[in-house]
Amino acid sequence: MLTLPLIRSTAVVASLIGITALTGVSSSCHAQPLHGSRTFTHQDTLRGSITPERAWWDVQQYIISVEPDFNTKTIKGSNTIFFKPTGKGKVMQIDLQEPMVIDKAFFHGIPLPLKRDGNVYYLTFEDDLPKKEQSIRIEFSGKPREAVNPPWDGGWIWKKDKNGNPWMSVACQGLGASVWFPCKDHQSDEPDNGAMLEIITPADLVGVGNGRLLAEHKMGTNKKVFKWAVRNPINSYNIIPYIGKYVHFGEVYFGEQGPLDCDYYVLDYNLDKAKEQFKQVAPMLKCFEYWFGPYPFYKDSYKLVESPHLGMEHQSAVAYGNGYQNGYKGNDLSGSGWGLKWDFIIVHESGHEWFANSITSKDIADMWIHESLTNYSETIYTGCQYGTEAGQAYVIGTRNNIRNDIPVIGPYGVNQEGSGDMYYKGGNMIHNIRTVINDDTLFRKILRGLNKEFYHQTVTTKQIEEYISKTAGKDFSKVFDQYLRTIKIPVLEYKTTEGKISFRWNNVVDGFNMPVKADLGGKTQWINPTTEWQSVSVDGYSGKVFKADKNFYITTKEVKE
């Protein structure tokens, strides 16, 4: 998702975290917020769960064509869905949000019966289909929901650049790709063989999509067609057209898997600014490849596309709208000063290529897998560029943005994410784990291992938690429970007597067992608190110094006898 104050939502309200009171920055900058107290409906269940009408088939590829009309704010197009039956089923759920309409659906050229239930269509086949690749063609049209405040509020974006040229795109994480095209709109099923996107534009504009440009040609006297293809699996919310007065430049980055094409599409009048600002891409890729493993989409290239909104992690076509400035819209989200040394959107959204695009949560309730790890990529990058202490200062500074309102993990099966704390609190949880491991060689092995073990996969929280604990050789299950499933911050209580310091955990889940490095009477050592009082002797100690290492996201409290 997007950037901080990022908070994306099922409804279209979220990918950024609220820090208005702290920095004056908008309270939602990351994803489209779906979090918050709400009553779930039948439509939420249809959108967020694996219904029987979804369960029996697996998406293989989307071939999408779209033509927008800027003046009427309407679109029309088609989607040919290649799929494989994995079980028996005659009724297929296809998602397309109102007021968009499926005009026709064909199977082997024969129209399929359609039945609508709100944001869902049911397509009925005459018989169960054999377990081999099949395809249907769906024609759609309508006036898609318009994004009022993208990317936090999702939908189609109709704007003009400063020269009055049409500038169009979509932002739909959380809200879902079905806001504009018919698909199986659930994160657990990505098209195994990628997607193709044909964009039909006015002749004086350029259409940019994910992956690589296959063809460009004229269509009559006043239109152009741009055909793009992604060869790797891709989540439907990442499939995005950009249409504007774009110019292109690029470079080749020589990475772990050889030459990586890096392409940049920016508005014509911003070319010089972009050439300067995008010099940050190469060092960022070098840092992330070192820590996370090879960029996950060499076949599809790396791309930044100037967007009519702040930004989003659209796979191999990252949306960039940060105004060619460092920080988050010129602000340092950490308050440490280090966040102004680099461009937040370039770093954060590119980090999502590893965590969100390659490793994707099956259910949006587990979106911490995307956002906590990507939030921590900002700390990783700061450390790469300016040293370990700078990275520590950055992540510690972001704690001021944590709200502890609701748990980070949301309810399952209803397309609902948890708290926006998945960014800063989640990033600090990862920093806790790194600090406990106390071995950056091993910590790097874990990050690279995640990207190897779950490369191009959809995953659950359980898989990620178990992998980290197993590879670290330490059981972090209670740490995950504490920071992801409660809003309680651990309190390390202590009391002092002559020559002795006692300590215990309070405000924690049962069995919480995170070790801590602390200054006990002037001596730094590791301690292993439990919920019962423990004591250590401190020779010659007569003061009251007890200080936990600043890298732990906890609080301390002195208990008086």
Image (cartoon, rainbow, N blue to C red):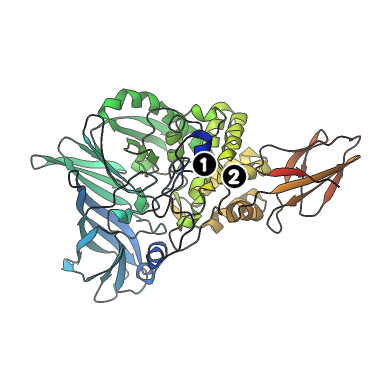
* Quadrant in which the N terminus appears: top left
Residue type, label 1? Asn
The reply to whether callout 2 and callout 1 are in contact (CB within 8 Å) is yes
Q: Is 106 positioned to the left or the right of 187 in the image? A: left
Q: Which image quadrant for residue 353?
A: top left
The residue positioned 47% from the left and 46% from the top of the image is: 355
Instruction: Quickly name the residue at label 1.
Output: 375
Q: Position of residue 142 (x, y in %)?
A: 21, 55
Q: Position of residue 45 (x, y in %)?
A: 41, 66
Q: Is 249 positioned to the left or the right of 367 in the image? A: left
The residue positioned 8% from the left and 39% from the top of the image is: 221
Q: CA distance from mark 2 to mark 1?
A: 9 Å
Which numbered circle lies on residue 430?
2
- State the residue in front, 112 or 287: 112
Q: Position of residue 468 (x, y in %)?
A: 59, 51
Q: Is residue 530 above or below residue 295?
A: below
Q: Is 424 positioned to the left or the right of 227 in the image? A: right
- State the residue in front, 38 or 479: 38
Q: Which image quadrant for residue 129?
A: bottom left
The residue positioned 28% from the left and 55% from the top of the image is: 62
- Mark 2 and mark 1 lie on one chain; the one further toward the N terminus is 1
The residue positioned 64% from the left and 48% from the top of the image is: 472
